[in-house]
Amino acid sequence: MSEFRFKKSSYSEPNGECVEVARNIPRTVALRDSKRPGGPVVTVAPDAWGAFTADLCQRQP
């Protein structure tokens, strides 16, 4: 398995509750719970991640 390099959002809570994202593997975006770094990793296509984050940006006040 490839080695993902996860990054936590600058918007994350001080107590560490956040989703971490890794984009260092071509054609893959990996996601994990920052509270469980050894836990499961979900992978999605970059287009799917882009559509998800674009939708989030549209919903912000």
Image (spheres, rainbow, N blue to C red):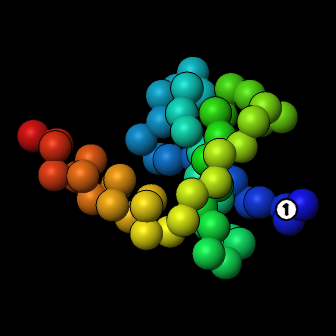
Query: Can you identify the residue that label 1 sits on?
Result: 3
Judging depth in this view, the residue of 34 and 51 nearest the camera is 51
Dot 1 surroundings within 10 Å: few (below 14), some, or many (20 or more)?
few
Residue 30 visible in the snapshot:
yes
How far across and down, in percent of the image, does residue 38 sit?
A: 83, 34
In the picture, which quadrant includes the N terminus? bottom right
Q: Establish if 38 lies above or below 8.
A: above
Say left or right for 14 vs 37: left
**Number of disc labels:** 1
- Rendered image quadrant of residue 30: bottom right
Q: Secondary structure at mark 1?
A: loop
> Looking at this rendering, what residue extends furthest in the right direction?
1
Judging depth in this view, the residue of 45 and 39 nearest the camera is 45
Judging depth in this view, the residue of 39 and 60 nearest the camera is 39
How far across and down, in percent of the image, does residue 17 sit?
A: 55, 26
Residue in the image at 74% along x and 60% along y: 5
Say left or right for 38 vs 57: right
